[in-house]
Image: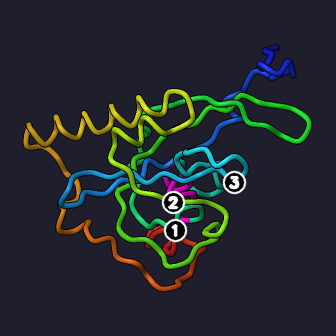
Amino acid sequence: MIKSPKGSVVAKATPEKFRQVAALPYRLTAEGYEVVMITTRDSGRWILPKGWPIKGLKPHESAETEAMEEAGLIGSAVPKAIGRFTYVKQFPKRQEKVLVDVFPLAIERQLESWQEKDQREVRFFNPVDAAALVSDAGVGDIILAFFVDLAKKKAAGTLKAPTAEKASPLPVEPDVDQASPSNKAVDR
């Protein structure tokens, strides 16, 4: 057993039961890369869009869905996680340690309205500011490492990322079927 700072018991996480997925939504503008972060509903802390895996979807597809539901973002997530962090989730009568896999999501557009629009603040940050503001331990390092890797790929001429012309300005799409975060989901 692990005890939290408040003294309540925190059970050890089992990979199957307490795993989540998170999107690292990003775009390239004329000024450089930007990361989208959202606030938590309860305390207003800055976090990446995240949630429980969705039955029938691959982990990166679940991350796409979370980005759509929580930030109105439509995009493509890479199938391989770039990092992992843990945090303690508060349930009504207990706390649990949750393991979260992070999937980069290249933003294609943002919906005009989405499921949690009135429940969270959504904001674009440069990667350094995002890394400094994010509240979950270890996430800042994941954000910075991802953009360092992008810079290395760009220098080597192997970068396959959106160009500034394609990603900026971010198109806003009128209300669409919010049940699917991408065209891939419609085909399922």
The image shows residue 121 at horizontal and vertical percentages of: 56, 60
Contact between marks 3 and 2 (CB within 8 A): the answer is no
Q: What residue did someone put label 3 on?
A: 41
Is label 3 or label 1 in front? 3
The amino acid sitting under disc 3 is Arg
Q: Main secondary structure of the magenta part?
A: helix
Q: How far is disc 3 from disc 2 in space, using C-alphas? A: 11 Å
Residue extent of the magenta highlight: 60-68
Is label 1 or label 2 in front? 2
The image shows residue 7 at horizontal and vertical percentages of: 85, 18
Which residue lies at the image location 55% right of the left edge and 28% below the top edge?
Answer: 137
Residue 122 is tagged as: 2
Q: Is residue 183 left or right of residue 115?
A: left
The amino acid sitting under disc 2 is Val
Say above or below: 138 vs 53: above
Q: Is residue 173 left or right of residue 146?
A: right
Q: What residue did someone put label 1 on?
A: 72
Local secondary structure at mark 1? loop
